[in-house]
Image (tube, helix red, strand yellow):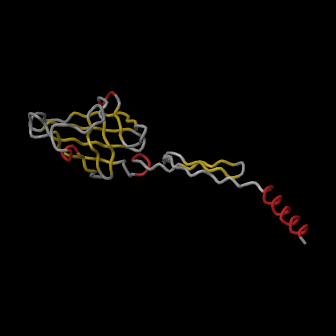
Amino acid sequence: MRLLQILCLSAVLITAGGCKEEKRPERLDKEIHPKEVVDTVENDTFEINTVHNSSNSLDWAGTYSGVTPCADCPGIKTVMTLNNDNTYSLSEQYLEKEKIPRTFKGKFSWDEKGSVITLDAEGDHHKFKVMEGKLQILDKFGDAKQGGRADEFMLPKVK
């Protein structure tokens, strides 16, 4: 009887020792960037673009208009039209100083985040942050304009 117990115990130990511990995947504590999610199933790789930004999520094409602060006049009437083919028309008129607005036309480009546009040389490389239903006029470095409240440099979408 004792021999039978030893044989059974040996069989259990050999069986348990022969099993490999299944390695569990490590928990991913690092930040996942929404720019691109990659999933691999068998030998196929699928890439899903999950980035939502102004250029691909907003209805940004249209006309924006407003009056922005001016140091030596009542304001600058600004009208910006953005087209789906990345062209623009910009009209600026210094109120009580200019009878006819100055008009600039050309192309614009998106920044790598897809939220700020920069006009070409014709538009003096002006920058605008594209937001839901409005544009924010930025300085040449892409920062908020100084010389007034931030909301004074917003151009609401008019059509």
Q: Residue at x 63, y 49 (%)?
A: 46
Q: Residue at x 56, y 50 (%)?
A: 48
Q: Position of residue 40 (x, y in %)?
A: 65, 50
On screen, residue 5 above or below 115: below
Q: Position of residue 101 (x, y in %)?
A: 19, 36
Choose top left, top right, bottom left or bottom right for residue 119.
top left
Choose top left, top right, bottom left or bottom right for residue 153.
top left
Question: In the rendered view, does 2 fall on the left or right side of 111?
Answer: right
Residue lying at the far bottom in this picture: please name it.
1
In which quadrant will I find the N terminus?
bottom right
Residue lying at the far front in this picture: please name it.
2
On screen, residue 93 above or below 124: below
Q: Which is more toward the observer, 104 or 31?
A: 31
Question: In the rendered view, does 49 fall on the left or right side of 84?
Answer: right
Q: Position of residue 121 (x, y in %)?
A: 33, 27
Q: Which is more toward the observer, 32 or 116?
A: 32
